[in-house]
Amino acid sequence: MISILVVDDSKDAIELILRILKTENYRIYSSESAIEAIQILKNFPVDILITDLRMPEVDGMQLLKFVRENYKNIGVIMITGYPSIGGAVEAIQMGADEYLPKPFTKEELLKAIEKTKEKVKARKIQTEEALSPFYGIVGESKPMKIVYNLILKSSKTDAPVLITGESGTGKELVARAIHYLSKRNHFPFLPVNCSAIPETLIESELFGYAKGAFTDAKNRRLGLFQSANGGTIFLDEISEISAQVQVKLLRVLQDGEVYMIGTRKAQNVDVRVISATNKDLSNLVENGFFRRDLFFRLNVIRIDIPPLRERGDDILLLIKHFSTKFAKEMGKEPPFFSEKVIEAFKSYSWPGNIRELENVLKMMIIMSDKNTIEVSDLPVNFKTSKIYQTFPLQTLEEFEAKYIKYVLSHTKGNKSKAASILGLDRKTLRMKIKKYGIEI
């Protein structure tokens, strides 16, 4: 329910607004002074502030300034009985979403509220994107900064991109970021899970069909490539497409032409192709399961997404991101995670990566009735996990020595990669290897 705070030094003005708002589904607070309104803002959730401009002691402009400095996502409607162009311009420049001169009708007030709600929604989206500049991708580790750099470079060209990474690492998020940062962002982004479409249907889904092309083709139907014209098509699990579809896809990449099933006439399409796979395509090429020429066409720009276990403290950012999101959806306060739980999360191998982390956190927040998540709340596979059992309670140095040894083993002795995973520079890692007498 939307909460609205009405502030005016005139009781009659407040009563008029309250009569209008009571016919709508809003939670309403009211105040006859800006000072009292500030106390309400501090103690109650408010979505929209409707305030008079001229009030004694603290006026509407000062109240607006306080709100913009402390509650950026509250919508503000400035009302006044002394309307002027200069006053309207100043109010908007100060951060008011709407400026409403008295007297106003019920329709004018409700329209101003609706417009303010839309502006607040847009502002929240922009704020979220600013906090996570790559459209929902959360992470600050060195491996992810490499991914961000490649996303930026990819967004400035129309060249095909091949995104690789284990299942659940966020390949579609990377593809979306490339699209929405590119000049194609005003056109469609169409994701296609190639493994989810039956082999008998994928050709018609991608390229469409003419009327009468087969028994059930009662009408002409455009394919996803035609629907994505001007934009981007994201072919997830590209390794699953058949040899026949590979040939047609190669033609699209080479000539920008699509042939609908049941017609010999080519259609020109302008579509950027981004593909993804969790398999080794080059290995599939060597074994004859994937066309070499298509692989080269798809693999112009390659982005390898690191698994969660190689992203260091990114897991802490992801825990905070998802737990806050799910707690809000469920009307709960974000939980506190005990140190042992954080240790278990950081030492777990996460075979399902971010998707697995997201599902685990959602389950724990749904099931927990406490403010603190303890080890007892962890899923069974955490308690029986080999890595979790590898690190029992011990001194920090003992734990560090074993973990460094584990990471070096995982990277097959590659110190540069191990240092990146551990969040250390190579010099510090060498010192610790020497200190703990670790043999490589």
Image: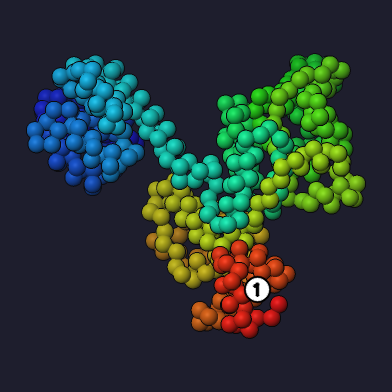
In the displayed orientation, state which residue is furthest to the left: 56
The reply to whether residue 381 is visible in this rendering is: no
* Dot 1 alpha-carbon crowd within 10 angstroms: few under 14, some 14 to 19, many 20 or more: some
Left or right, residue 13 beside residue 309: left
**Residue at the spot x=73%, y=69% of the render?**
412
Q: Which residue position holds label 1?
A: 406
* Number of callouts: 1
In the displayed orientation, state which residue is furthest to the right: 288
Q: Position of residue 210 (x, y in %)?
A: 80, 17
Quarter of the image where the C terminus is located:
bottom right
Q: Position of residue 409 (x, y in %)?
A: 70, 72
Q: Position of residue 226 (x, y in %)?
A: 71, 23
Left or right, residue 426 beside residue 241: left
Badge 1 element:
helix
**Residue at the spot x=86%, y=47% of the render?**
285
Amino acid at the residue labelled 1: Tyr
**Residue at the spot x=45%, y=64% of the render?**
337
Q: Position of residue 290 (x, y in %)?
A: 86, 43
Colour scheme of the picture: rainbow
Q: Which one is nearer the viewer's eye here, 12 or 38?
A: 38
Left or right, residue 226 beside residue 288: left
Q: Which one is nearer the viewer's eye here, 393 or 415?
A: 415
- Above or below residue 130? Residue 245 is above
Q: Which one is nearer the viewer's eye here, 145 or 226?
A: 145
**Residue at the spot x=59%, y=71% of the render?**
427
- Above or below residue 217? Residue 181 is below
The reply to whether residue 394 is visible in this rendering is: yes
* The quadrant where residue 45 appears: top left
Quarter of the image where the N terminus is located:
top left
